[in-house]
Amino acid sequence: MKAFTQMKALAAPLYRSNIDTDAIIPKQFLKSIKRSGFGVNLFDAWRYLDEGFPGQDANTRQPNPDFVLNQDRYQGVQVLISGENFGCGSSREHAVWALDDYGFRSVIAPGFADIFHNNSFKSGLLPIELPSDVCEKLAADCVATEGYTLDIDLRARTVSTPEGDVYEFEVDQFRRDCLLNGLDDIGLTLQKRNRIEDYESTRRQFAPWLFNAQ
Amino acid sequence: MAGKTLYDKVWDAHVVDEQEDGTVLLYIDRHLVHEVTSPQAFEGLTIAGRKPWRTNSMLAVADHNVPTTSRAEGIEDPVSRLQVETLDANCKTFGVTEFDMNDHRQGIVHVIGPEQGATLPGMTVVCGDSHTSTHGAFGALAFGIGTSEVEHVMATQTLLNKKTNSMLVSVDGEVGPGVTAKDIVLAIIGEIGTSGGNGHTIEFGGEAIRALSMEGRMTVCNMSIEAGARAGMVAVDDTTINYIKGRPFAPTADQWEAASTAWRTLVSDDDAEFDKVVRLDATKIEPQVSWGTSPEMVTSVGNRVPNPDAITDSAKADGVRRALEYMDLAPDTLMTDINLDRVFIGSCTNSRIEDLRAAAAVIKDRKVADSLKQALVVPGSGLVKRQAEEEGLDKVFIEAGFEWREPGCSMCLAMNADRLEPGERCASTSNRNFEGRQGAGGRTHLVSPAMAAAAAIAGHFVDVRSFS
Ligand code: SF4
């Protein structure tokens, strides 16, 4: 996994509540058996005027000029500022892969759906929860100021604005360590192989029906 | 010390290891797998040279991409076909039990797990699919995971997870006639909102939940994710245990006594404390219809579409305005004045035998309205389909003008050929009314099977209680 420590990057606002994973990456693109290439279809139904389907040549599509990410000033964006309950809906990690593939490294919102939040950490996308009045202000400032950048420091757990405001955010110790060091969860867990085996053999004794083979 | 909730009991029984910050290594008993969220996980295993930890914890099925018309010709769309073939190949390579597309037991993953007895009380059940919450109906702790976590479970039989808060949703009293599990859960989501359950595991209790069949409880738990909850659970009782008995994966004769005795302890203690408690009066719940693009945008069938101008909270008013625009609905429209293009009865929320019986009872000896382009019934599994045919339900549907299809996810998310065209409006027994969910530009209204059936006959929504 990609490590995340500190970065100063361009932000874009998409300030609405309940942005669901179907909106982030529509289902027709979930047919891929790969992990990459989802960025061109991020927010597909909002971003393009024509209907998207897998395997299209992106150069022949009609971008929606009104959609925020299509504006020149947001090219090279890495931070998304959004509303309550971001990433609700399906468990598709493709939503995170699409954001990541597009170039996003962090999403700032007042709240995230549980599975999306979990998934983000696995691909090195940092979900940052800040109070809704702060998110609203950041989104408004972002609209008002061309080239609005935020400084995100995972070690210090802070988001700093160009005006010098600093907001602290919370993140689990374990997740922060994994992200700071780009650690692979599975490798870490397998270091506890013996404990898993011990647990399993005890449980097999008390609840053998859980281990029946078919 | 306060007693334990059902959630506490199942959680505690699965803790392999706990770190200082509360991150737990949680043992997983059952891992359900489908074609959409597994290929990258299998690939990850292969690249790392790892093997699944315990293949007999896994059960795989293709459901999202499969055609619901005849299976004989295979899958026409080459991208869908590749995904299904990839699952077949992975299951073969790694020795995972799979019900392939032509197996008579094939169906929607959340229908076949319980149907096979692969979902048991007290288990931890995961699947790369958010509606894994369905399995909580059995007093299991069941939740959806992303593909990286699918790989983690395959490789280690565990997940890294943190305990959520607990929430009791108690539905007190009895529901009136014509009010179903779907109406109960839509009313709950209407009440607490789509993020009302965020950070929580919900236990559904109260007389109205206890009175539900397992099918009904699955419908309720299925939609816990639509309230933002990690999982939904229902305590074990006779209804649970009777349902499981004799199913193929269920404990065999010599284990049955010990298993069922253990399962009976899977209830919250009387003195257990929940972090949050919500109570609903079952007698006040009416048949529900969603009007917007989020499951919380729902109301009773006798009501009207809301008027954003009457909402004081401006963010909320904007959300309603945007939803009504997408749904092409004028403020204050009577729900019963909304005309439909298609009706879909199916999905892991409502495609079990009881759902089909409820729908068939409404349409018997009636005809689908001429104004409808299509009315579709997609059974949840091959076994549900067979059972329905034995009961003659297929004839009831077909005579009324419904199409009777092969099992799968179908028009719930339109990954196969079944979908809405842009602008079309559908009464659907599924669980999500998000923009484009049933096809780009399509408009979805969530309802119970009985309400969908009545709407198919009338061509618009009607209150199934006064429908004659
Ligand atoms: S029926 Fe719908 S909600 Fe259920 S698993 Fe299939 S696509 Fe997901």
Image (spheres, helix red, strand yellow):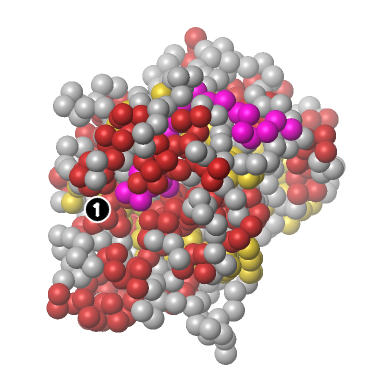
Which residue occupies the extreme bottom position in the image? B1
Residue at image point 63% right, 50% down: B190
In the image, the segment drawn in magenta is: B332-356
Depicted B62 relative to depicted B255: above or below: above
**Between A96 and A165, the one nearer to me in the picture:** A96
Left or right of B373? Residue B3 is right
**Between B428 and B11, the one nearer to me in the picture:** B428
Residue B333 among magenta residues: yes
Place of residue B62 in the rendered image (x, y in percent of width and height, measured from the top left): 27, 40
Residue at image point 35% right, 68% down: B239
Residue A166 among magenta residues: no
Place of residue B27 in the rendered image (x, y in percent of width and height, measured from the top left): 35, 68
Q: Mark 1 points at which residue?
A: B59
Tag 1 secondary structure: strand
Is residue A214 visible to us here? yes
Quarter of the figure with the N terminus of chain B: bottom right
Q: Mark 1 lies on which chain?
A: B
Left or right of A86? Residue B57 is left
